[in-house]
Amino acid sequence: MVRNISRRTFLYGASGIAAATALSGSVGAAAILNAHGVSEPVVPAGVKFRGVNLANNFTQTTAADGNDIWASLWGVWNWDGLIAPQLDDIAKIGNAVRIIGNTLVMALGSITLTQYLARWQQLLDHAQSLGLYVYPCGGDLGHWGNYTWAQSTQTYTELAQLFKGYPNVIGVDIVNEASQPLEPVGWTYNQPEPVADLLTELGNQVRSVGLPITYSRSVVSSSGWTQDYFTDHLGDFLDFHVYYPPQPTDSLAAYG
């Protein structure tokens, strides 16, 4: 077990060549404070994250889980048949894994928060035993269910407390592709609270335990790299999900 060592010790001792799904300024030889005054995890100079998204099996999506692929991942929780073998395979080709969480599965009453946290812990323990860095995503606003502000905050507060005990957790994507609900025709978002306030509060809960955060967003054309979303200014690094065939130099525009 390595849970009792510091995040810094783990990151300095981690082996494997890595690669990043995000643009991050946290790579360096010494701890730095980001713009929010949070001490970011330290990664050895020159190390990159080479990662894979943990995927679900579309055939196991059930009506009980709202016909949602991510709710079914957490509700069915096919550990031996899908999740653990997938982590094993990821460890053979990379050194990092990204996992999308879900609130809909709890909003529908499929599982409790206690069960949800236990499944996260099982996943984190196995990833750590394989030497994998973990990049968790809290959920997806398009699949939030009827979770209230209080329920959402409780979930993220307890998730943050769990994540901080794992030095291989390198950062948290607060919600998957947060830019989508901000579009003129956005995804379904049922909460009465303003989305900007909710996103800020959830991010604050995770950052309070010392983890860097981001709010990933989609890029559907070359101009998307320079579009300005308010969520870009709430996080500590950027994460773009590309949905068009890009030119090799397109992403360079984001650095401006």
Image (cartoon, rainbow, N blue to C red):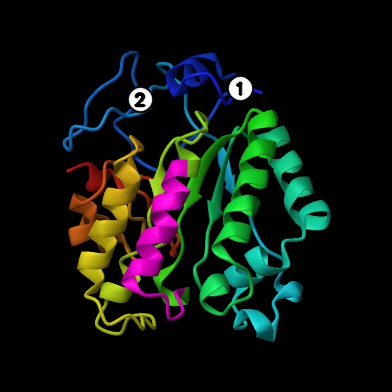
Q: Position of residue 109 (x, y in %)?
A: 59, 77
- Label ID, residue 223: none
Query: Spatial distance from mark 2 to mark 1, Cα to Cα?
Result: 22 Å
Look at the image and tell me in which quarter the N terminus lies.
top right
Q: Position of residue 78 (x, y in %)?
A: 77, 60
Task: Please give the range of residues in magenta.
Answer: 144-161
Q: Position of residue 187 (x, y in %)?
A: 38, 80
- In the picture, measured across the screen, residue 111 lies left or right of residue 146, that is right
User: Which amino acid type is shown beneath numbered disc 1?
Assistant: Val
Above or below 50: residue 55: below
Q: Is residue 147 magenta?
A: yes
Q: Main SS of the magenta segment? A: helix
- In the picture, measured across the screen, residue 27 lies left or right of residue 7, that is left
Look at the image and tell me in which quarter the C terminus lies.
top left
**Residue 99 shows in the view:** yes
Place residue 227 in its image quadrant: bottom left
Q: Position of residue 118 (x, y in %)?
A: 63, 51
Q: How many marks?
A: 2
